[in-house]
Image: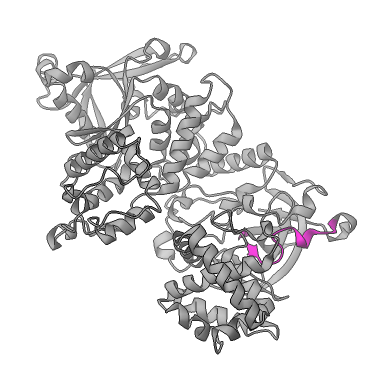
Amino acid sequence: MDLLYEQLDVAIGQIRLLYVLPLVEAGHLFAHGDTTQCLLTTVRAVEAESQYDALSYTWGNPTVTRTIIVNGYELKVTENLARFLREWRQRSMDNDARGFVNRPLWVDAVCINQNNEEEKSVQVQQMGRIYRSAARTLSWLGESTPFSSIAMGALDEMAREIVSNREGTDPTGWMNDEQSHLWSNDCQATTCKMHENLLFTTTNHVWNCIMEFFDLTYWGRAWIFQELCLAREISLWYGHKALQLSSLLEVLDWRRCVQGHPFPSFVSEKLGQILHLGGFINETYLENFMRIKKETNSKDKEAPGNLQDWISYVIVIKHLEATDPRDKVYSVLGITNCDVRPNYSISVESVFAEFARISARSSCNLSLLDFSGLGIMPVREEGRFSMDVHHLFLPSWVPNWDTLRTIGSVGLLRSEDWRADAGLRDTIPFGFVGENGLHARGIALDIVATSQSLASDDLLEFCRNYLHGSSEPHSRGKELVRFLYLDTGLTSQLKYHQIEDKSEFYIDAFGSISSVLGRIGNIPEREIFHMLGFHSSGDMFQRFFGWGQHEWCTKIQKSTERRFHTWGRDFEVDLAIQIFKLMVAYNVFTLREGRIGWGPPRMQVGDIVCIVSGYALPVALRKLDGSTYRYVGPCFVIGIMGGEATEGVAVDPARIEDFNLI
């Protein structure tokens, strides 16, 4: 293989470009039959700007390969790449497309010597410039499937209709009953069975095909995110069909705009529900992509990079996959212009640990603890989620970006939403990160007395037991509301720390939560107060909050108006999703002094809940000896999230302890 690759001159910015030879020419050059034949050339990147196309694709199974011929040498490439090269060659036989297809390509698997770690490190650092400089980026989604033509055609049709209706104020204005293929219940048993692997399906065959489109492996790869953010122009190739990415974004932007608008009567009910919820695509991923692409386009391409951008982008792609785990950190470097050179000669553990040290030192805080901890892997689904196939051995405080892709709810507790360490921030430094561990300073709060996971049928029982486990249920009622609501709302209208009238918070939050508890347990809302151990709704509100009958009747009437007329019912759907995620991703725990909270699923009785300077969430630690601990994970504890537990620390330095995390 070294015979194929000559050393690139880094000083003058050399790259390689690949020409795929059409069949009519290939037969005259090499005697290899139908095997794809190519020419590999070396050029200066600055001279090749806008003269080539860059390929964005998934490698696929690295053990399933096909042979291509490059400069007369046989080269093994993955099957997915071989399929694209055949499609590219086939299109070159179309006279109308020859000018488009005959441009050279930049393809990472061929244009980078994959056996040379030094070259890989240099070229990966240059990939930002490579994709920015390409005339266009071709996104290869794979060979044609029974769904590809239907999905691509429908997306293109809808995009054109949406653009034509852009001046209108009603986002549903372009829809009509003649588009029965888009809105009707036409999915028969045979066609529905074709989509049985989808998490969500509708009764419309076209939209099921579109959901198959969004379920493609392509959208779940880490490198793809950077490539799409950097590209000037993007053409999606799915088998023989092509679609501009801009058309796809038009449809997705419409789906966001249509939330809260009633659909016409000819739209099937189930389809309308899924379009309102956006269940067929990761909305957060899309929003981050569009935001970062806009930021990338507005930046000075030659300006020095920002380490904080690098850190935030790694967090954005935490759920995406990479064949080499090191690329979970390196694959977004090209968006940032950071002067960081990837190093593929060191271990995955070393890359992750160094990234954690850079994160702590550059941000002067410990927000990386949002995504680390030996206890964050869900216990109930251990068989499904224990996918650390690389068997990494990392310090407990270093995020394992490889495993995080399998745990969708990690990061639901984000330090940016709270300030539990408020009394420590100006008193003591956040600590320091050394080669051998993280040295933190703070206070020990309490010891874990109980820790349990909650299934949906356990939640009401837990609420009932907690409410009636005290002689003052109204006090516990307020704590329970804050516990389920996480003190911070999904809308800006309902945040505990921002509302002066706390009774307004409690009544609004409890009204929503009682509805959600009914949804989760499939129980009529009117029966919730019986399930919680009260005789009537009046008894519940009197004992729950300590209010008299006239007071709670007046408050309920005003609350109902706020909840449904101001916010809309989608708010409660979001709240139900939040509570469900909490039950899946976290344990409920109690401390010896009686406080309750959410903690990592592997939290154990005897773990210590602490608050450390530089991190706005309480942390669960497991003591080893002396001042040495292992980090278990972040926590939420009622009554201390605003800094209450750290008040007065400045005048009582004896409370400060050292915590050495390994």
- The colour scheme used here is one colour
Q: Between 539 and 639, which is closer to the camera in this rendering?
A: 539
Q: Is residue 644 magenta?
A: yes
The residue lying at 76 percent from left, 61 percent from top is: 644
Please tell me whether residue 5 belongs to the stretch shown in magenta. no
Q: Is residue 599 visible?
A: yes
Task: Residue 588 in the image: state x and y as whole percent.
Answer: 57, 71
Task: Where is residue 261? Give x, y as percent.
Answer: 37, 52
Q: Which residues are magenta?
A: 632-649
542 in relation to 620, above or below: below
**Viewer-nearest residue: 458 or 566:** 566
Q: Position of residue 622 (x, y in %)?
A: 66, 64
Q: Position of residue 125 (x, y in %)?
A: 48, 26
Give the quarter of the image for residue 570.
Answer: bottom left
Q: Residue at x 30, y 44 (%)?
A: 173
Compared across the picture, whether 635 is left or right of 387 comes to right
Quick check: 445 left or right of 94? right
Q: Residue furthest bottom?
A: 535
Q: Nearer the viewer, residue 548 or 156?
A: 548
What is the count of numbered marks?
Answer: 0
User: In this picture, is 130 found above or below 191?
Assistant: above
- Up-down: is 557 above or below 642? below
Of residue 532 and residue 131, the one placed in the foreground of this image is 532
